Image (cartoon, rainbow, N blue to C red):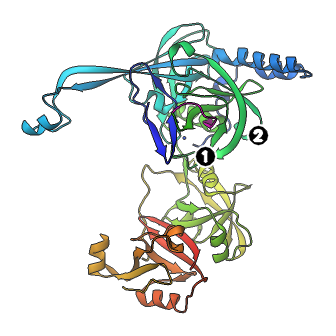
Amino acid sequence: MSSKRCRYAVLAILSAGFFAVACPPVAVELSSAGVALYAGSTTALAAETAKSQPIQSLADLNQAFVRIAETATPSVVTIYTETRIDRPSPFFSGPFAEFFNMPKQQGGNGQKEVRHGLGSGVIVSSDGYILTNNHVIDGADTISIMTSDNRRIPAKVVGSDPRTDIAVVKVQATGLKPIVIGDSDRLKVGEWVLAIGSPMRENLARTVTHGIVSAKGRANVGLADYEDFIQTDAAINPGNSGGALININGELVGINTAIASRTGGFEGVGFAVPSKMADKVLNELVKNGKVSRGYLGITIQDIDENLAKGLNLREREGALVGTVVDRGPAAKAGIRTGDVVLEFNGRKVSSSVELRNAIAMQSPGSTATLVINRDGVSRTVPVRLEALPDKPGATTGQTTKSEGNVLGFTASALDGQTAEQMQKKPDPRRVVVTGVLGSSPADRAGLKPGDVVLSIDKRPVASFAAFSEAIKGKKRGDMLLLLVERGWSRIYLAFNL
């Protein structure tokens, strides 16, 4: 099993294999209507069972868990995959390839190596649609499932969405029991949850474990483009990928996806894609074969204490707008770099990740209402969203020598020599960071060589003379607010010298 190391921790994708597994480590937006489209005919047996009898003793609590497990387990399947790869010849690969003047990737001996993978999935419709993780089925040549009544059934991929690590497969079968889809938005930290899946190996299929919701809204985990993970301490292990996270009503609230671990096994930190996100992806994949997301055309960042001071904000709230893509939806609506988005469609914005997910949840062509703070004044801005492009468009921005002892960095006009050194297009009107002193406040704030300085303390920097004027008189302890261009993005940085 592959894993992604982060210092001493390993972020493990939860797929296990019999002989080998090609599931490298790596989490959309979703419409609330969701799988109700497919689960509409499903009776809420779990919810009725859990609510019909009040829990008055430990025995009642025990029976409640038993009823939930009995109700939800038949909706969870084991997923088997086979992936065929070329088995290289020892004589026509590696160093021998150069001897025979052959590319190293060529030279196979005609034989195929079959790699077997094991994961989990959740039945979401009586006609055979099954939710799982993209990394469980990605690249597989053949897929099959095993139901709770031990039927082995071939499956085909309906669609996949690597940006959320969600996929949908389909089987032709009768007598399937779809799960009830719950509302993950209503889930609270501290609630009991059950995890159901096939950890480690085939003979452990439909293992049930329990724990609580440890946290919600986990992002920057490094698993997917759109992350809003539920964190749980319910025991999940390799092979649980694509399995069900169930609330005490027996409803699906998440798709188990990964664990944080030093060993690759369970250590009490698991992550699941919320059912609301998985639900939207499911319906889009079934209807359209792909997922369409709303696009605002901005880059955003969180506001820390220094940025709040530099921007004269009373509170650390909202998300700060950096880049505004030329001719994008935000630009057309009049949104500017430096605006702070406080609300999106009537909901307060607490982080940049939350706003990014909220934008992506919307359908292209819909109108979103933003409340922004611009220079201390709140205003409401309607924006017609477009479809998220496959690749972000480049933007144009304003972007040679300075003493950097006080600043913690040096900068220069982007003349011919400096441009060649920094591998940029020459433009003497721009000011580029040429060096950052290690462990300086600038370094700790994230400033990097190659960043183009667009403004200092909200004063535009259109030349090196303007840069020099802006930093004149700066001394130790002073606050410095920079707007820099990095690649195609604009980023605010604030720090005390």
- 424 vs 334, nearest the viewer: 424
* Badge number at residue 181: none
Q: Name which of mark 2 and mark 1 comes first in the sequence.
A: 2
Residue type (three-letter) at the residue carrying disc 2: Lys
**Magenta stretch holds residue 374:** no
From what the image shows, is residue 69 above or below residue 332? above
* Residue 44, visible in the rendered structure: no
Q: Residue furthest left?
A: 100
Q: Position of residue 92 (x, y in %)?
A: 13, 30
- Hey, which quadrant is residue 211 in on the image? top right
Residue named by callout 1: 361
Quadrant including the C terminus: bottom right
Left-right relation of 216 to 45: left
Tag 1's secondary structure? Answer: helix
Q: Do labels 2 and 1 touch, CB within 8 Å?
A: no
Question: Over which residues does the magenta segment extend?
Answer: 264-273
User: Is the residue marked by circle 1 packed among few (<14), some (14-19), or many (20+) residues within 10 Å?
Assistant: many
From what the image shows, is residue 38 above or below residue 216? above
Q: Residue furthest right?
A: 56
User: Is the residue marked by circle 2 packed among few (<14), some (14-19), or many (20+) residues within 10 Å?
Assistant: some
Tag 2's secondary structure? Answer: loop
Q: Position of residue 124 (x, y in %)?
A: 62, 23
Q: Position of residue 227 (x, y in %)?
A: 57, 45
Quadrant including the N terminus: top left
From what the image shows, is residue 338 above or below residue 296? below
Residue type (three-letter) at the residue carrying disc 1: Met
Depth check, mark 2 against mark 1: the one in front is 2
Q: Report, in whole angstroms, how far the alpha carbon at label 2 lies from the one at label 1.
A: 21 Å
Residue named by callout 2: 188
